[in-house]
Amino acid sequence: MKMWSSFKKELILAARGFYFYVELGFAVVIMLVILFAIPENFSSTNTEYFYFNLPEQGREISKNSLLENDTDGKIEEVEIETGGKVYPAGLIVSDEQEIYIFESEEAVRELADSERNLGVVVELDENNELFYRYYLQGYESTRLKNLLSVLLNESTVVLEERINNQEVRTLTTGFEPITERKNTIPPLVAFSGSLMGMFVMAAYIFLDKKEGVIEAYAVTPSSVWRYLLSKVFVLLLTTVVSGLIIVIPVMGFSINYGLLLLLLLTTGFFASTLGLLIASFYDNMTKAFGVIYLLFFILMVPGIAYFIPGWDPFWVKIIPTYPILQGFKEIILPKGDIVYPLLTSAGFLAGGLVIFALTNIRFKRTLSV
Amino acid sequence: MIKVKGLYHSYLKDGKYAVKDVNFEVGEGEIFGFLGPSGAGKSTTQGILTGLLQLQKGDVTVAGYDIKNISRKMFNKIGVSFEQSNVYNKMTAKENLSFYARLFDVETRDPLELIELVGLKGKENIKTGEFSKGMKHRLVFARSMINNPTMWFLDEPTTGLDPAIAAAIKDIIKDRNKMGVTVFLTTHNMYIADELCDRVGFIVEGEIKLIDSPKNLKLQYGEKLVEVEYTQNGSVKKDCFSTILQKDKDALNKIINEKEILTMHTKEATLEEIFIKVTGRELV
């Protein structure tokens, strides 16, 4: 009864407050960004500009060679404008490339300069052999330059033979990749749902401290832990709602929502108790801002590692957000590991309980008159 | 109802005490005034008595409960009216009291009845954020009665209230006291203490300087004087005479016999004057 009454009171306060709508509004904005601003998959199409300064026959052979990869097998006639001039070009589009074939070297040079793409001029040298002139941007790696040299100087037969002789063993099988859009869900859910709870919880406590209502609560037969837990429950509710606002429109009902709710609740519990603990040391948000900002920064680091798979040092793995991100990722993967989110949930529940116990002691000791 | 023995409290635990060696008792049904200027240790003492501050040193019992091992059940018996208007600003007056009522294990009073009692009828469904400071203060006072406390802690209950409302609040305190409620009144307002308290304690710099009833204090420390206004040679004169000194008594007799008396009354010392005399400190 006391718990329910406190929870109901916190719900009323949250519904009439500012932070509740900030959290939900933030989730809606993120959902809209994922749906309408982030593409299903990031485009990896290269654009290259060619000019074949060759006899008619050589030009046709080169064009036909490139045309083999075109999606519709036809060269599209287009006009490209740059530097106040219009250059006619033939466009060949494949899954990985957009190749513009121009009728002058000047056009290739101008476009490579203005559009920051690779330009290639192919012509015959004095020995009647193919000669390539590349217009690069200056920032290309030595490896790329070497690769271009190898491709032009080595026999393609030799290259193919070497590639074919390499043995490739697949260590993991049976997984299905997810789209780039879906891949953005774990960090956004973790930061907007779970971690936002830390900040909002601290804000709620500081508001109560300002109004002095904690003291009023402390002189009732209801324990301080009930007061704290009722706030945690409200935060968990907003964490779950904001998490679902982001996940459902993108993932539909293709994932295990039981696991998602479990991870949202346990990580939200951990984050909100962390917010409580921080708030127990300070009187107001201004004084606590430095610590909250620092903690936010540290907790954001695994988000960087998440998008750079090659950068995964040990110290990043021990930051709590790392297992949170991996846990959410396992949940949205078509054949994700069920055990990992379960273990992660158990860990965050245990951690949250320890922090909650500490916070309860802190609040009992630091109530001031 | 309250027993305090050898109470010490240091906020930084550095030997600098906000209260030191405080000893007093408050009997059942008594109104005890705890008087002192700001920073004297009134709030610290009340904080310890109400469990808001941890007891560091000393023995304290409130309503039969040992404060060393505080039991939540104790709060069913006590009510606390804070000086700070600590209500939820985003909740209405009724919501504030209804929420608070549900936190107790004993029968509670009707929030609307209490709202009416403190003169806030018609404001029950208004968010307290829209209340004036005085209105909030009255709501805090009403809230402290929600559980029908037998031990009532009041911290500056009439501060910021207009005279009519303050009088109504004083009447409520008197009525509750007649019903057997013990009151621990913390204030720096000597007039309300004089009017309400059976006994008062003067606290300065964390130490209790004196405890007695206002009447005894006036008898002990007040100078027995008579102030007379009379006419002499067509003009009005005003003199003050001691009722103890023979020389003054004779002079007063002479004036009564020979002059036309306009006004004459005894002049008692106020509690404030006694406080200054005893502690050497002003109350502000």
Image (spheres, helix red, strand yellow):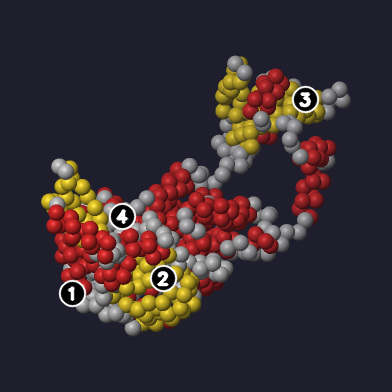
Residue matched to label 1: B178
For label 3, count other residues whose C-alpha is less than 10 Å away and answer few (under 14), some (14-19) or many (20+): some
Which residue corresponds to the image point at 40% horizontal and 67% vertical from the top-left? B203
Residue indicated by mark 4 = B89
> Is the Cβ of the residue at disc 4 closer than 8 Å to that at disc 3?
no
Q: Quadrant of the C terminus of chain A?
A: bottom left
At label 4, the amino acid type is Asn
Frontmost of labels 2 and 3 is 2
Are discs 2 and 3 less than 8 Å apart at CB? no
Identified by mark 1, the residue type is: Lys
Q: Are marks 3 and 1 in contact (CB under 8 Å)?
A: no
Inter-mark Cα distance, 1 to 2: 27 Å
Frontmost of labels 1 and 2 is 2
Looking at the picture, tell me which residue is in the foreground, B265 or B10: B265
How many neighbours does mark 2 have within 10 angstroms: few (below 14), some (14-19), or many (20 or more)? Answer: many
Residue behind mark 2: B208
Residue at 63% x, 28% y is A115
- Mark 1: give few (<14), some (14-19) or many (20+) Cα within 10 Å: few
Mark 2 secondary-structure assignment: strand
- Mark 2 and mark 3, same subunit? no
Distance, label 1 to label 4, CA atoms, is: 33 Å
Measured as percent of width and height from the top left, residue B201 is found at: 35, 70
